[in-house]
Image (spheres, rainbow, N blue to C red):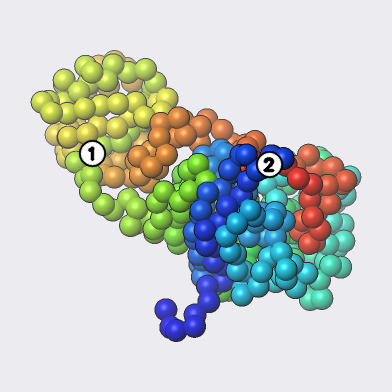
Amino acid sequence: MPAGHVPAVEVTDLTVRYGSEGEVTAVDGLDLSAEAGEVLVVLGPNGAGKTSTIESMEGYRRPAGGRISVLGLDPIADHRQLTELMGVMLQKGGVYPMLPPRHVLDLFSRFYAAPLATDDLLDLVSLRGVATTPWRHLSGGEQQRLSLALALIGRPRVAFLDEPTAGVDPEGRLAIRAVVTDLRTQGVCVVLTTHELLEAEKMADRIVIVSSGRVVLAGTPTELSGGAGSNRVSFGAPPGLDTVALALQLGPGVSVRETAPGRYRIEGASGPAATATLATWLAARDATLSDLVTGRTLEDVYFDAVGAAALQQTESSTDDPDDGEGDGSPGRGPRHGGRRRGRRGPR
């Protein structure tokens, strides 16, 4: 980077604590940065500190320590100025439940000097067909897409998206990915949190893996999955297989373990012969083989970084209660328009 370069988002030694005396540390000396035109995914299990981190970057939570710069501004001291330059997508809530998408977008557009047109936003997130349906009658995916539209209405230079695909159907996920790709093309810095491995891999330019409030790994998806470990096979099959018997069938020096219910990893064997042996062994037990991947995957990297319990959590949960959920009530006040939402426990 040239001398004097300032990242769009820069976080140094961030610490966030909760409790009357700060006895609970949710974020512990975390560092990260993101550039204009880059999609940075903050990946981690429930309670890792993802939302506490993103709320601090937005200026909605005052950290106990560290330094944060967003577009060269301090999110707390320069908050009023920054709200005109950033977009914020809540994980849940923040919308008046009786208002339909068109009315919500019209209302929030008044917070900005040069908002995007309501019709353009409805088309962008594929909500024109439900533009007059009250928010509370929208599907979960439609509600998420409306939240995304609210984050974009002010033409932000930085967009913070908290679990944008949580609870969203496949069609909605494709729409959200397309919007994120378009933001990158426009030079917008996108910082999003998720605990969904596939979404992280699909959308990220870089991934930061967070566990227990600290960054444990960071890099591009290729960098993270392209290291050592090619003598490895990952696959899906019914849970509870006899992994010891399978390892013996695959040959000496091979180990097999179930990393999460229905997900398996073979160490010490790969290639066509191992694949054929695996398929034959499963067929003899009337077990279906799926999602076969040879080599190191992002799932492997994540599993190694945060442990089995966290990996099982990410695969069994679509909501992130420890990373913050809204109740959708109007009393909370929408963050999309730069108004502070209520305090919550540690995330």
Residue 276 visible here: yes
Label 1, residues with CA under 10 Å away: few <14, some 14-19, many ≥20: many
Residue extending farthest left: 252
- Image quadrant assignment for residue 329: top right
Image spot of residue 293 (x, y percent): 30, 41
- Front residue of 68/70: it is 68
Q: Seen in the image, is 257 located left or right of residue 326?
A: left
Figure label count:
2
- Image quadrant assignment for residue 280: top left
Cα–Cα gap, marks 2 and 1? 47 Å
* Residue type of the residue flagged with mark 2: Glu
Query: What residue sits 58% from the left and 43% below the top?
Result: 25
Look at the numbered disc 1 and give the secondary structure of its residue.
strand
**Residue under label 1:** 232
Residue extending farthest bottom: 3
Q: Is residue 256 above or below residue 295?
A: above
**Residue under label 2:** 21
- Front residue of 136/29: it is 29
Q: In this view, does 170 lie above or below 280?
A: below
Quadrant position of the C terminus in the picture? top right
Look at the numbered disc 2 and give the secondary structure of its residue.
loop
Query: What residue sits 64% from the left and 55% below the top?
Result: 63
Image spot of residue 13 (x, y percent): 52, 58
Q: Is residue 15 above or below residue 287?
A: below
Quadrant position of the N terminus in the picture? bottom left
Q: Seen in the image, is 316 located left or right of residue 260?
A: right
Label 2, residues with CA under 10 Å away: few <14, some 14-19, many ≥20: few
Q: Seen in the image, is 136 located left or right of residue 5?
A: right
Image spot of residue 251 (x, y percent): 12, 25
Q: Seen in the image, is 201 located left or right of residue 116?
A: left
Query: In this rendering, which labeled residue sits more in front, label 2 or label 1?
Result: 2
